[in-house]
């Protein structure tokens, strides 16, 4: 096993792909190469880049480009029906008389942090103890849950019995099964990579060691300075204390000089780290300090707007909407794809162009039928669902008028034709058009927590220095964790860094 340090912007993925290239050139079959990542996004990016670069089939040839927990599921003999879902937890909850919050279906391609956040606090605590391989009581004693130990222990016992009786499994069961039984079903690899290794939990490290045994060559890649998932069980010390060969990618192709100076000031505060050589780009870049995001011109370029906690971003999203910016907010577009498709589709029809049946359905969804209250007769009664029109079938305005009950004409603009479009969406689209935003395009502004943007980058980065009350408490006990979070934040920058200073110095991080 060989360790590769990849500080921000040093081309870690490219370096790993070069090693894959060398392996392929030497005759190694792509199915004998595994690339295992901590997050789905990282795994998919590596798969897409490898498929494009080496002209490979991503599904057939790159089957083992996955997250670790996805690998565990794919190699097991467990069927999807055996995976614990919200309905199972609801049944368990009713039988115990203890309310469990389980609103999200489990997808084993989901990122581990997302799974942890989506889980009920009790279930999250139980899973965290298992991932860290510590007694549940020890994990409970270090938590701030306002529940008694007897309640936690009761749920844990009931959960274990429920899964045993019904032959059900959760994602931690998959990992445990891989650790204990993986030697019986894990294939042999010529080459294996484990990316973002600083974020692996103790249980995932066990899997990494098993994979090392089954691989001729294995690389673990990551950066201890970017270890920001301790709350999800990450064991950065295992990466720091790794006993074996190492190499460091020292030249950043992303970070300009002025931003690097800020990052350097942060990273030197981390007490427990591996000191490494890390050089910026020659370009100077810009760093500025501001009191309010309204003082920043967001009209051009790519942007990442980040804060330590999600609730801090809600006013930002409101501001961007009110001024007609298209953006992505914590993974979702500021205007839905359905509405964008409907508005653009209607304008296409007005120009004499054709649209798909699916687009036509989206348009009709926002039109009143003939007998609707305050209707201006956009659609004849009985045609709302466009029966008989296939999703992939193409139709124009005349087809819809003659065969599908459309009464609205090309003289109507989108906001006239789609009279059932919610007023807030109508106003927002008008604001977007006035600003000249292509609201059906890819948002150039991303708004997210710092954890949510890890791995991303932009020409312009805005970082709020505020921290939550919980983070303030944690910083007293584990200051390194917060240093790493803001180090990750500022190193997303390609050109300009904008720091929004907090009003309360006691509740803000000194960037």
Image (cartoon, helix red, strand yellow):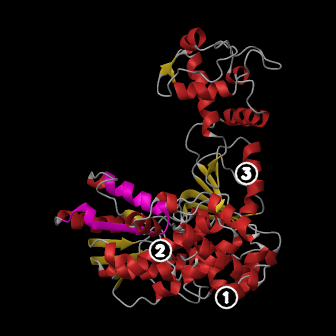
Nearer the observer, disc 3 or disc 1? Answer: 1
Is 39 part of what is drawn in magenta?
yes
Side of 184 where 402 appears, left or right: right
Is 301 part of what is drawn in magenta?
no
Does residue 242 sit above or below 159 in this rendering?
below
**Earlier residue among tags 1 and 2:** 1
Report the residue that reaches farthest toward the top.
Answer: 402
Q: Identify residue for label 2.
A: 175
Q: Residue at x 52, y 79 (%)?
A: 201
343 and 97: which is toward the camera:
97
Q: Secondary structure at mark 1?
A: helix
Q: Secondary structure at mark 3?
A: helix
Q: Quadrant of the N terminus?
A: bottom left
Q: Quadrant of the C terminus?
A: bottom right
Q: Residue at x 32, y 64 (%)?
A: 17
Residue 228 percent across, percent down from the top left? 58, 75
Magenta-colored segment: predominant secondary structure: helix
The region drawn magenta spans: 28-52
Q: Secondary structure at mark 2?
A: helix
Residue 479 percent across, percent down from the top left? 67, 84
The tag on residue 392 is none
Crowd class of label 3 (few under 14; some 14 to 19; many from 20; radius 10 Å): some
Q: Identify residue for label 3.
A: 317
Nearer the observer, disc 3 or disc 2? Answer: 2
The tag on residue 137 is 1
Residue 237 percent across, percent down from the top left? 51, 87
């Amino acid at each position: 096993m060989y360790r590769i340090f990849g500080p921000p912007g040093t081309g870690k993925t490219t370096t790993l792909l070069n090693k894959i290239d060398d392996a392929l050139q030497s005759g190694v079959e792509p199915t004998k190469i595994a690339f295992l990542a901590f997050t789905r996004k990282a795994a998919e990016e590596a798969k897409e880049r490898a498929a494009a670069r080496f002209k490979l089939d991503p599904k057939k040839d790159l089957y083992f480009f996955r997250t670790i927990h996805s690998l565990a599921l794919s190699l097991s003999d467990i069927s999807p029906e055996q995976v614990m879902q919200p309905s199972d937890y609801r049944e368990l909850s009713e039988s115990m008389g203890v309310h469990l919050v389980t609103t999200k279906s489990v997808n084993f391609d989901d990122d581990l942090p997302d799974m942890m956040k989506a889980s009920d606090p009790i279930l999250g605590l139980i899973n965290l103890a298992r991932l860290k391989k510590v007694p549940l009581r020890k994990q409970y004693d270090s938590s701030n849950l306002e529940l008694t130990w007897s309640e936690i222990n009761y749920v844990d016992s009931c959960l274990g019995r429920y899964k045993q009786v019904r032959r059900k499994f959760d994602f931690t069961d998959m990992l445990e099964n891989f650790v204990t039984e993986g030697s019986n079903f894990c294939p042999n690899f010529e080459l294996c990579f484990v990316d973002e290794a600083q974020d692996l939990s103790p249980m995932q490290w066990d899997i990494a060691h098993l994979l090392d045994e089954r691989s001729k060559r294995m690389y673990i890649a990551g950066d201890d300075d970017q270890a920001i998932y301790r709350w999800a069980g990450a064991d950065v010390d295992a990466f720091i204390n790794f006993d074996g060969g190492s190499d460091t990618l020292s030249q950043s192709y992303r970070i300009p000089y002025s931003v690097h100076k800020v990052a350097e000031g942060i990273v030197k505060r981390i007490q427990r780290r591996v000191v490494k050589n890390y050089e910026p780009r020659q370009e100077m870049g810009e760093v500025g300090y501001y009191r309010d995001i309204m003082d920043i011109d967001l009209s051009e370029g790519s942007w990442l707007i980040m804060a330590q906690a999600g609730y801090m971003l809600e006013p930002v999203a409101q501001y961007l909407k009110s001024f007609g910016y298209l953006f992505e907010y914590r993974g979702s577009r500021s205007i839905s794809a359905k509405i964008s498709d409907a508005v653009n589709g209607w304008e296409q029809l007005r120009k004499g162009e054709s649209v798909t049946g699916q687009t036509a359905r989206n348009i009709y969804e926002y039109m009143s039928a003939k007998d609707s209250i305050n209707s201006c007769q956009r659609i004849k009664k009985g045609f709302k669902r466009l029966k008989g029109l296939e999703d992939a079938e193409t139709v124009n305005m005349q087809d819809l008028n003659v065969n599908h009950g459309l009464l609205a004409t090309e003289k109507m603009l989108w906001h006239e034709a789609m009279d059932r479009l919610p007023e807030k969406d109508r106003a927002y689209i008008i604001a977007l058009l006035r600003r000249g935003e292509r609201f059906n395009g890819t948002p150039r502004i991303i708004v997210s927590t710092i954890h949510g943007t890890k791995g991303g980058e932009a020409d312009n980065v805005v970082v709020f220095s505020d921290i939550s009350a919980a983070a303030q408490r944690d910083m007293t006990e584990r200051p390194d964790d917060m240093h790493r979070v803001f180090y990750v934040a500022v190193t997303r920058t390609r050109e300009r860094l904008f720091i929004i200073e907090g009003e309360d110095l006691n509740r803000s991080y000194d960037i």
